[in-house]
Image (spheres, helix red, strand yellow):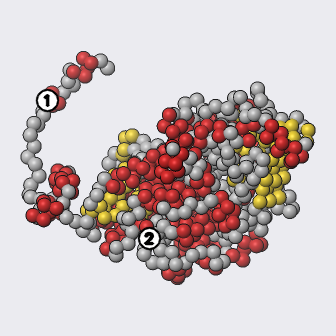
Amino acid sequence: MTSQDIFNPTSNDIYDIQIFGKGPEGKLPLTSKMLREQPSGNIFGWTQNAGMGLPCSKLGQKEFLIVSNMGGVKRSDGKPIALGLHTGHWELGAVVKEAAEEFARLNALPFAAHCTDPCDGRSQGTPGMYESLAYRNDAAIVIRRLIRSLPTGKGVLGVSTCDKGLPAMMMAIAGAKELPGLIVPGGVTLPVRNSEDAGKVQTIGARYAGDLISLDEAAEAGCKACGSSGGGCQFLGTAATAQVVCEALGLSLPHSALAPASQNVWFDIARQSARCLVQQESENRAAKDLFTEQSFRNAMTVFLSFGGSTNLFLHIAAVAHAAGVKRPAINDWIELNKKVPRIVSVLPNGPVNHPTIFVYMAGGVPEVMLRLRELGLLELDCATATGEQLGTMLEYWEKSERRKVLKQMLHDREGVDPDDVIFALEKIDNLDVKGVVVFPSGNICPQGSVVKSSSIDPALIGNDGVYRKTGRARVFTTEEAAIKAIKEMGGAKKIEQNDIIVLICCGPLGAGFEEVYQITSALTHLPWGKTIAVITDARFSGVSTGACIGHISPEALAGGPIGKLQDNDLIEIIIDCKNLEGSLNIVGYNDKSIGLENGTALLNDRESRKDLEPANGLSEDTKLWALLQDVSGGVWGGSVYDYGSIKKNMR
């Protein structure tokens, strides 16, 4: 196309230009008091409302803002004009519509604004992943600013689904906690019977490279993983875990997390959430009523009982910070972790890999909370989205028709006992189900690390419940180099069975604290992969499995000891899956064992590697984010911006 093409019209109707408009009919229902006392913005807001087509008779209704992460553009028949970045936000417009119509039925005036979100699956292994966690902070700021940009708003309803959009939405509402606030979770994608889930399908490249599947099998599996066009992934990854935590905090209606997207029950949740928000406002309640140290402890407890994504260690701390509540420290997690049993059997770490919709049908978050109530692990006087105390809500749930009907449907349609999805307490001891996470410490990670111990292959765990491994280090400074070595099973740096992949320069300063699921997923689905352990200053997807230790602190580029490791160092990993304790240490080099004490001395004497550098393509914005979060408490502080800490460090 040339300038001449642009300036020569394809049709003369482009010259049918109207210079003046008629303007809306009617008059603003102003009063003398309003004109004398109201800010000009409030009055001009009415002018804008009329300009958008609102009848003047409806001006003055209570205003509520719906903020969503919706993305993409559809035709009237639902077919795509422009695709969204992922299924998690593709159907959210329908939820916004249902909620808006319900506000209107309640004689309230709905507004809608949007701040869309990325897909961590789409950006795996790409420079897009460098922006992922930084996006969360930026989006939380944008959404909070949008909320404040409707100064006459009486409440905010968030609509969100996925890995970063939902934590950002929680942070934003926590930052605007003087208003009533609720979130409608975006639900989950339906599974496809006899097909791969959206987690396993992300490994088709590694499996094809390893001659485990054909090109045709890869193509078919890649096409059929999503059983519906909306919702988060079918496994308990970060998206699903964030929905669980949101409900456990009281920010979502009871039994709303993990609902099947794009179905009637999902739309009913949207309508009921709108009604609930209007009720909150009429009763002078606000989101701040939900954010207490006790409610965050409940959310932590529910999270641990589900066995969810380790990314929520970051997000729960970030939401607490936004709400002005004390952030849980690593010691708080360690203490609670030893008290809470794993209750849910779900993808990706079982014991049976049920899809997340099965958890919803088995009772979801309220059902898990019933078990935790029996164990005395919940604060029952915390507020919920309905305004009732948690204990009252659980009494209603226990007797509800909904609980009975959905459990029976799961049993009758799928032949699945709901008590095998959300364990009856008497089954926990018989199944020998252990806790979810361990926080290894040692000379490689003096400020801590985390491993999802429940996802380690049971065949690798001794009769005493301890995973032990000593192996040689194979060090990579980029994810790209590591995945290449895995796919080629050799090349310039050969990986052999029983090696330990050391992946560095991937923390906040190195690569925006990237998520390295393509590494862990490849190892999970390769025959020899389970013999390989991974240690890294990066983070993992909630669907990752295996002996994968992440969040190693300090990171390599912050001078952490992990940045001193060399090829052929001997690394010892001990993870006690029963007592939930662990260690990670260098104990030798070049096949020579020198013991823990000498290994520590060796690290202390070494300089950091000369090849440590940030990833190519790391943006200036993300570099700034990394510096700011580092002085704000870092990884264990939620990777947030803390004004007081930043100001102190500037002096």
- At a point 59% along the width and 75% down the height, the residue shown is 378
Residue 545 in view in this figure: no
562 relative position to 176: left or right: right
* Disc 1/disc 2 C-alpha distance (Å): 57 Å
- At a point 74% along the width and 66% down the height, the residue shown is 433
Which is more foreground, mark 1 or mark 2? 2
Tell me the element at label 2: helix
Residue named by callout 1:
15
The disc label shown at residue 399, or none: none
Name the image quarter holding the N terminus. Answer: top left
| Amino acid type of the residue tagged 2 in the rendering | Asp
| Amino acid type of the residue tagged 1 in the rendering | Tyr
- At a point 76% along the width and 27% down the height, the residue shown is 491
Tell me the element at label 1: helix
Quadrant of the rendered image containing residue 181: bottom left
Give the camera-side residue of 34 and 437: 34
**Residue situated furthest front in the rendering:** 651
493 relative position to 208: left or right: right
Give the camera-side residue of 591 and 317: 317
- At a point 71% along the width and 64% down the height, the residue shown is 435
Residue 600 location in percent, x, y? 82, 44
Residue 344 location in percent, x, y? 65, 66
Is the C-beta separation of discs 1 and 2 under 8 Å? no
Residue named by callout 2:
289
Crowdedness of circle 1 by 10 Å Cα count: few (<14), some, many (20+)?
few
Residue 293 in view in this figure: yes
Give the camera-side residue of 281 and 644: 644
